Image (cartoon, rainbow, N blue to C red):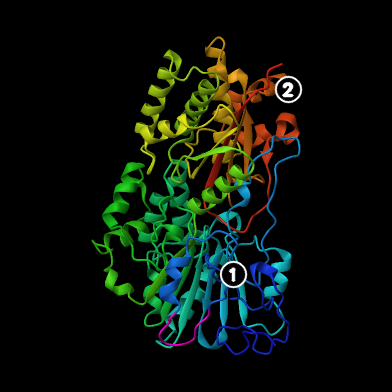
Amino acid sequence: MCRWASRRVCSERECSKEPVPGEFGGGGCQICPLQGIAVNPLGPLQPIVSTTPSWPWLSSMSQWHQCCSPPLGLGALSPQPRGRPSAKAPSLPSAMRCAPPAPFPGQVSVGPPGWVQVSGRDSLSAPGRDMLLRPHSRIEVIEGARNNLPDQEALRGAGAIRDLAEGLTADDLLLVLISGGGSALLPAPTPPVLLEEKEKLTKMLASRGAAIQELNTVRKALSLLKGGGLARLAYPAQVVSLILSDVIGDPLDIIASGPTAASSHSVQDCLQILDKYKLLTSLPKSVETVLSSSPASPTSLEDYSHVFNVIIGSNTLALDEAKRQAEDLGYATLVLSAAICGEVSRVSALYCQLIQLVCLAFAGLRDGPLGDEVRAKLLQLAAELEIPGLNPAETLQALRGLGPDGPVCILAGGETTVQLQGSGKGGRNQELALRVGLGLHRAQAAEAGSPLGNCEIIFLSGGTDGQDGPTAAAGAFSSLELVDEARREGLDVEAFLSNNDSYTFFSQVQHGHHLLVTGLTGTNVMDIQAILIRAKERS
């Protein structure tokens, strides 16, 4: 008999399936949605469910949120297989396989007796869909937000979740699983704003280079459920949110636009963002109406005493695991930052300077005039980008401890932005990889006897969700030889970049050999970059 059959959170009270040890990250019934929901780093996987009013397990969960392996997830969904680079590519650490599989990428609400409602994207695999939609299941699945854009199905799902939350009592528990894509999955525009108006405004902000923090600040100001709205509607029920962070710094009110977290932003913050991107004078009348009637200050934290938010996965955890695997492969490894941000052209320049500095060290030229010049450029770029947690002096000191006796791996993560100028097809990871390839080519051409030519260099940038922009790739690899390879095939790197057409470029050069294609991973903890450098063998 299923171990969960006596629990009110079990969706199948008459389930007769035997537990399956080890499957889906832990033993248990395949169709019970809450088995294996947390991982204790100090011991084996332990399912945690409490139906007592005191919620004794909540106080202990905060010490478990920094675990990465073994993976955590819903018993109803098997983890998606992780992709690997082409066999022709140099051996890489498993940076793209380290993020834990997500709980279902959306919102799962457990409400009146054992009824579960799920709002999710169309990325749900066929096996997962079969397991969720068993005959007579109490689980209702509403799929929407195709291509990570709010649509009518997502609007219907948000309405159903809103109705469920409003009907809860003090005896109920609302369980919310939050990950990247949550903003698109839970659209509930504040009347009279229409979904189409809000989506158009969001697209305009994104096309002008607005960061995710800015996008979600505006979204919150125009939503009934974002910015803590879902948690407020659920009162007096207890609310527990398990969160995969896809935002730099893990701010609870920005991840998925914070449906269960108190907003730290006011309407004035929203107006400043709209003014920054020159959209304040062209707003729809409905948006002006909502903003003009919004409270001047954020909601008090006291209004969220019934809410418990826990971050169970993040970019930092992914990088830590990538570092461990790189070291197991023999790389001297440095984690640069989990908060890489800024426009891709500036971030790519920073990475090029880092790579040059390591290659100079391999050649014994780190402390010469060229080394001084590279260090000065690196410090200037770091100051301009203002990357949180990146201390340039400490980074330079750490780089001195790398090589030249063995291969070097530099890891970083975060989320960059692209200033759209063309009409091509691409994503921030592919554009970053292409710009690094071009930057390395230019650096080698500008310096006679450049030490770059004495090193093997691979740069990888990829999204942990498996999709970079509106493309089929998670990201791309680049190298010092990329530009020359492209020219031999008649491809102009700069022309592709000026049209923001990085996916088309990588699809064509060497028949797509440089693309990172993993398929949708089922999780999202932002992007990861890996730089691999080793000295070439002397002939």
* Front position in the image: 148 or 446: 446
Residue 287 placement, left or right of 182: left
On whether residue 51 falls in the magenta region, the answer is: yes
Q: Which residue is mark 2?
A: 489
At x 66%, y 32%, the residue is 505
Q: Quadrant of residue 276?
A: top left
Q: Quadrant of residue 99?
A: bottom right
Going 44% across and 19% down the picture, which residue do you hit? Answer: 371
What secondary structure is found at the residue carrying circle 2? loop
Q: CA distance from mark 2 to mark 1?
A: 53 Å
Q: Which mark is residue 44?
A: 1
Q: Residues within 10 Å of mark 2 (few under 14, many from 20)?
A: few
Please report the residue visible at 53 percent of the width from the left and 46 percent of the height from the top. 527
Q: Amino acid at mark 1?
A: Pro
Q: Quick one: 530 or 134, which is closer to the camera?
A: 530
Q: Quadrant of residue 116?
A: bottom right
* Quadrant of image for the N terminus: bottom right
